[in-house]
Image (cartoon, helix red, strand yellow):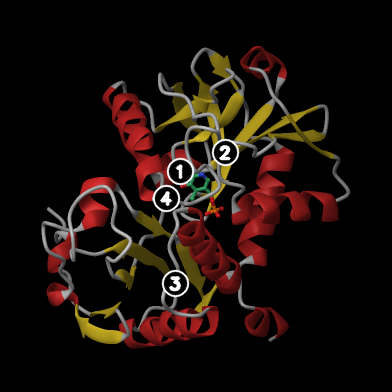
């Protein structure tokens, strides 16, 4: 058994202070816990530097704004806290998890007066998917739940509540022996996996769905840039599930997942090919700190 997450060693940045890992606690009557009034980020450090830290911090602040609250620290302070915590934790490669949530000052749906809290934790999270399976391509089920219409949920926010259907879908997929699930959107178009965006390849052209009801991932945007730098055509468009039949390659991408080839989605089969392999390599090169690359 691995050590439970509330029992690990180290420090957590909690509302402006570095506290002992085991002491970073909240009360059971926390608004964020009862009503999902929480937003978070997932970042990765490579070679001692957090990749695209400022973009993640800005998205965190924006996610809070969409939920109607102001994260009570500026982007400079949050970036400095992440960097100092990474140094204190002593990791070179690590996962960084800032989370902001409404506190426990009052209970009930309305919580305008509740304190907005911010905590940052950093731990080692080597590979999101089984490393052995990863380059062969992982297997995805097709989820029953769909990404909601943006008129029914704050889909541009990385809000905790949006992950409820992701956890249900991921559990259902794993129970059937799959690594993850592909989620369609409310219209029935291809959307994303439970914690990563999706790409396809056909005849040398890269295709990815328009992020109009799911997270426009920072990794997704990086991969689009990398593909264009390789001279590849990238089509960002609505993708229908029937089209899966015609794609030769598929891969997921996200901060945690990095670039992960996909071999199966329900009845459809894909072969991790040259474009996927190239983008896996290009992404791993891109995330390395520029100071290391220059050495
Ligand atoms: C649901 C979901 N989609 C997409 C992504 C990819 O976002 P990013 O590349 O910004 O990490 C994530 C997070 O990693 C996610 O949780």
251 relative position to 177: left or right: right
Asked if 241 appears above or below 177 in the picture, the reply is above
**Closer to us: 287 or 132:** 287
Q: Residues within 10 Å of mark 4 (few under 14, many from 20)?
A: many
On-image quarter of the C terminus: bottom right
Residue at the spot of label 4: 159
Q: Is residue 260 visible?
A: no
Q: Mark 1 or mark 3: which is in front?
A: 1
**CA distance for labels 1 and 3:** 20 Å
The quadrant in which residue 31 appears is bottom left
Q: Residue at x 33, y 61 (%)?
A: 112
Tags 1 and 3 touching, CB below 8 Å: no
Earlier in the chain: of badge 2 and badge 4, it is 4
24 relative position to 36: left or right: left
User: Crowding at label 3, few (<14), some or many (≥20) Cα neighbours within 10 Å?
Assistant: some
Q: Which residue is mark 3?
A: 93
Circle on res. 261: 2
Marks 4 and 3 sit apart, C-alpha to C-alpha, by 25 Å
Q: Which residue is mark 1?
A: 195
Q: Is residue 258 left or right of residue 82?
A: right
Ligand 1 is within 8 Å of the C-beta of the residue at disc 1:
yes
Q: Earlier in the sequence, mark 2 or mark 3?
A: 3
Q: Secondary structure at mark 2?
A: strand
């Amino acid at each position: 058994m691995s050590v439970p997450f509330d029992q690990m060693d180290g420090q957590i940045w909690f509302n402006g202070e570095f506290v002992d890992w085991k002491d970073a606690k909240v009360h059971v009557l926390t608004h964020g816990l009862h009503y999902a009034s929480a937003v978070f980020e997932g970042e990765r450090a490579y070679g001692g530097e957090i990749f695209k830290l400022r973009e993640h911090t800005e998205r965190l602040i924006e996610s809070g704004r969409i939920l109607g609250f102001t994260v009570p620290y500026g982007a400079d302070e949050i970036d400095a806290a992440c960097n100092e915590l990474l140094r204190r934790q002593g990791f070179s490669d690590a996962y960084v998890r800032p989370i902001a949530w409404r506190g426990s000052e009052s209970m009930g749906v309305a919580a305008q007066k509740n304190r907005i809290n911010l905590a940052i934790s950093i731990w080692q999270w080597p590979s999101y998917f089984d490393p052995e399976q990863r380059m062969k391509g992982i297997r995805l089920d097709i989820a029953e739940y769909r990404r909601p219409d943006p008129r029914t949920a704050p889909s541009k926010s990385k809000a905790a509540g949006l992950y409820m259907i992701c956890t249900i879908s991921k559990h259902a997929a794993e129970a059937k022996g799959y690594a993850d699930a592909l989620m369609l959107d409310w219209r029935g178009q291809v959307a994303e996996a439970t914690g990563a965006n999706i790409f396809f390849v056909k005849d040398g052209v890269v295709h990815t769905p328009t992020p109009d009801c799911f997270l426009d991932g920072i990794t997704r945007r990086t991969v689009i840039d990398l593909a264009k730098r390789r001279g590849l055509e990238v089509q960002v468009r609505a993708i229908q599930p029937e089209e899966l039949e015609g794609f030769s390659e598929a891969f997921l991408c996200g901060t945690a997942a990095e670039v992960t080839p996909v071999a199966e989605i329900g009845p459809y089969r894909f072969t991790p090919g040259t474009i996927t392999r190239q983008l896996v390599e290009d992404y791993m090169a891109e995330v390395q700190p520029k100071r290391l690359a220059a050495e």
